[in-house]
């Protein structure tokens, strides 16, 4: 009996022992021989590779007011393989997302596991989609670029693409700086796919993200608004095709405002929040990408060269009484007969005849040297993509008429930025400054940023000559063609321009299409601002002194008041109060 | 009389009460240690979920904050302020004759 019982116990123990031995052997097999494969499989099941997108840097104006910022918003995706009735789902979604239902249905049909339905949607739409509680439709966060000031400085700022890459404007020029560096992270997940231990030991960072750097512009939001508002009003009243306005600090070369407008009837100016609604011509920054014949606003360049070379004196009398001049095979006329004028009045009254006579004295070699010294024919180096050097022929291939044509701003192509930079030199005592838009880069990762300061390019003319040109340009505003540019309370200096455009059909100068311009600086004695206004193809009155000069005046008055620059022209009604 | 229970009793108590008590104590300690280890692990996982939830909440709040900042920036645009000032509040730019230039008196140091 006892033997029998012991036998049973031994049998049970043996079986248990065998069982444990089997388990032990299995463990050895799994832990030792199958280790690598099973470890890899476990990692695949438990770990998730998470791509960490860097936050794109912001763009601020000079007072650190946001002009472009990024925000995470929802993108809507679908799982077509699990959708039984794609048509019904597409119908419901199209009502929320305002997308074509047929397009949505086509995307939702098929056996794919993931398909984008609408990316970077507004929060309201995303909430409505979430409220559907449809497990086959989901939301993922993606970074979207916002331009809170809407159309303000649109062509200058540019815009980004769907994957946050800079496509135009400053977004493109500074894409590497703004974009940052993507990171990768391996996170543990549980059986239902939830992330466990965020930031804990379960997280193994492969590469940390580096947020994009912020950039601070030299642009002032308020001056930019003033420039755009005044330009828009004039474009609307003159039914012009477009216009450019640049406001710069002549002492430093900082661009305080840069407004580029292309008029498309029934549509507001380019809004970078919705770039898909506009054509490339509407977002192109024509202040640097397009060259145009400047017309009479180029005459001060000739005046500077002639005065510097002492081939003329400001008070020398020049006979313009014929009102026309034959140069090579071309007859160039004045707008009206002026009689005998001092050289100062030749510029003030914008006499082509007088200007050409002085240019002939100067000679093409010396004239071309000064044209180059003022930066024409080469890029200014401003940090805006797409800049062109303009069109300037080598003086050795100038025709007989070239010297006369170029002196009055024909046969030469300049960009508005080149012209504004040249007037900065006239305003600051003769030093050509490199225009710049970005004043600093802020490293959001704690590293050292970068600052940009004024960069003198070269001395174009002496201070003495500059003072003479300054007085001539003051005369233009006081009693010449630019009287409508006179800002209340301030002295101003500048030049009007009314340049004929080339008729694309005939290749000759058009009789009805003009570019009306005014460029100058305020206050005249101690200039704080250089303002260029260019209106493309105005209708009706086309003179620069009538179309562009009032815009200059309005921008100058408002901007100087905003900058708290004390009026220097006391006038007759200005009350001075001692405090 | 030998019973089955008696066999077990003899198995436990045959080698003396002190030795057996030690074995039980060791077994309890091992089991207790395992429970503590597993409990700790469970707690860590639970805390992990809580941290993840808090992280998500933090991200949401940051997003809301950023969104509000964008809205504030949009609302404070000069175009909108000027429109409200002129159209709603009836404000105008002061004409030249209403402007007064106040010349700052030089301070004693400047004198």
Image (spheres, helix red, strand yellow):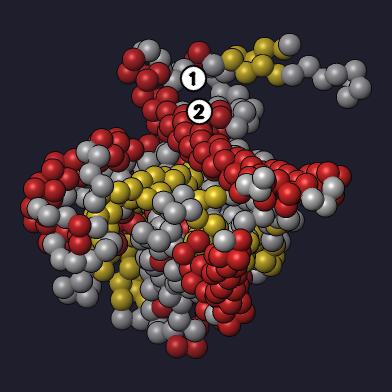
Residue that label 2 marks: A488
Q: Position of residue A393 (x, y in %)?
A: 45, 81
Q: Quadrant of residue A524?
A: top right
Disc 1 to disc 2: CB gap under 8 Å: yes
Height in image: A437 above or below B81? below
Q: Position of residue A392 (x, y in %)?
A: 46, 77
The residue positioned 46% from the left and 17% from the top of the image is: B94
For the view shown, which residue lies furthest in the bottom direction?
Answer: A396
Q: Quadrant of residue A579?
A: top right
Residue that label 1 marks: B96
Which sits in the foreground, A142 or A148?
A142
Chain letter of mark 2 equals A
Q: Are marks 1 and 2 on the same chain?
A: no
Chain letter of mark 1 equals B
Q: Position of residue A31 (x, y in %)?
A: 60, 74
Height in image: A256 above or below A337? above
Q: Quadrant of the N terminus of chain A?
A: bottom right
For mark 1, does the 10 Å Cα neighbourhood hold few (<14), some (14 to 19), or many (20 or more) residues?
A: few
Q: CA distance from mark 1 to mark 2?
A: 7 Å
Give the mark count: 2
Height in image: A43 above or below A226? below
For mark 2, does the 10 Å Cα neighbourhood hold few (<14), some (14 to 19), or many (20 or more) residues?
A: many
The residue positioned 52% from the left and 62% from the top of the image is: A47
Residue A461 horizontal side relative to residue A286, left or right: right
Helix, strand or loop for disc 1: helix
Helix, strand or loop for disc 2: loop
């Amino acid at each position: 009996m006892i033997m029998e019982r012991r036998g049973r116990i031994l049998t049970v123990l043996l079986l248990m022992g065998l069982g444990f031995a089997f388990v032990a052997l299995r463990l050895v097999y799994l832990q030792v021989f199958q280790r690598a494969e099973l470890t890899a499989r476990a990692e695949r099941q438990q770990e998730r590779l998470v791509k960490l997108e860097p936050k794109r840097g912001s763009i601020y104006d000079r007072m650190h007011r946001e002009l472009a910022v990024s925000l995470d918003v929802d993108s809507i995706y679908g799982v077509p393989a699990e959708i039984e009735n794609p048509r019904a789902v597409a119908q419901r979604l199209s009502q929320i997302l305002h997308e074509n239902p047929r397009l949505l249905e086509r995307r939702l049909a098929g056996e794919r596991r993931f398909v984008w339905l609408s990316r970077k949607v507004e929060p309201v739409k995303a909430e409505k989609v979430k409220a559907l509680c449809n497990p086959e439709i989901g939301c993922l966060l993606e970074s979207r670029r916002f331009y809170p000031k809407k159309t303000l400085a649109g062509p200058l700022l540019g815009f980004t693409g769907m994957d946050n890459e800079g496509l135009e404007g400053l977004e493109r020029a500074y894409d590497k700086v703004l974009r940052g560096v993507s990171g990768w992270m391996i996170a543990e997940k549980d059986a239902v796919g939830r992330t466990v231990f965020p930031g804990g030991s379960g997280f193994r960072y492969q590469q940390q993200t580096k947020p994009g750097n912020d950039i601070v512009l030299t642009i002032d939001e308020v001056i930019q608004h003033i420039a755009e508002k005044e330009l828009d009003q004039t474009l609307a009243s003159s039914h012009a095709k477009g216009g450019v306005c640049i406001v710069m600090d002549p002492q430093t070369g900082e661009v305080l405002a840069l407004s580029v407008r292309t008029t498309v009837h029934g549509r507001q100016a380019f809004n970078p929040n919705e770039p898909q609604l506009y054509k490339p011509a509407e977002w192109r920054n024509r202040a640097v990408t397009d060259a145009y014949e400047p017309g009479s606003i180029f005459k001060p360049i000739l005046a500077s060269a002639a005065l510097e070379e002492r081939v003329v004196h400001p008070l020398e009398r020049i006979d313009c009484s014929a009102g026309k001049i034959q140069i090579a095979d071309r007859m160039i006329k004045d707008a009206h007969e002026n009689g005998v004028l001092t050289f100062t009045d030749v510029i003030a009254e914008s006499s082509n005849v007088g200007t050409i006579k002085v240019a002939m004295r100067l000679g093409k070699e010396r004239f071309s040297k000064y044209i180059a010294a003022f930066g024409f024919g080469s890029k200014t180096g401003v940090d805006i993509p797409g800049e062109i050097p303009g069109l300037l022929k080598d003086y050795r291939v100038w025709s007989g008429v070239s010297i006369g044509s170029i002196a009055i701003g024909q046969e030469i192509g300049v960009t508005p930025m080149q012209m504004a930079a040249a007037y900065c030199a006239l305003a600051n005592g003769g030093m050509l400054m490199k225009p710049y838009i970005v004043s600093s880069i802020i490293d959001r990762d704690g590293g050292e940023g970068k600052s940009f300061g004024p960069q003198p390019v070269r001395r174009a003319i002496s201070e003495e000559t500059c003072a003479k040109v300054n007085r001539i340009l003051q005369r233009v505003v006081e009693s010449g063609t630019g009287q409508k540019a006179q800002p209340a309370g301030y002295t101003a200096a500048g030049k009007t321009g009314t340049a004929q455009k080339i008729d694309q059909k005939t290749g000759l100068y058009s009789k009805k299409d003009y570019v009306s311009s005014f460029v100058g600086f305020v206050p005249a004695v101690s200039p704080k601002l250089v303002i260029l206004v260019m209106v493309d193809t105005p209708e009706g009155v086309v003179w620069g002194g009538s179309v562009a000069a009032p815009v200059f005046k309005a921008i100058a008055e408002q901007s100087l008041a905003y900058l708290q620059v004390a009026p220097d022209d006391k006038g007759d009604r200005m009350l001075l109060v001692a405090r | 009389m030998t019973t089955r229970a008696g066999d077990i009793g003899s198995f436990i108590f045959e080698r003396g009460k002190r030795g057996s008590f030690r074995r039980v104590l060791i077994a309890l300690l091992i089991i207790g240690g395992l429970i503590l280890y597993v409990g700790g692990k469970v707690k860590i996982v639970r805390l992990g979920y809580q941290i993840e939830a808090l992280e998500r909440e933090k991200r949401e709040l940051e997003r809301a904050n950023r969104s509000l900042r964008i809205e504030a920036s949009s609302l404070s645009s000069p175009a909108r302020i000027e429109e409200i000032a002129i159209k709603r509040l009836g404000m105008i730019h002061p004409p030249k004759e209403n402007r007064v230039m106040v010349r700052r008196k030089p301070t004693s140091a400047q004198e």
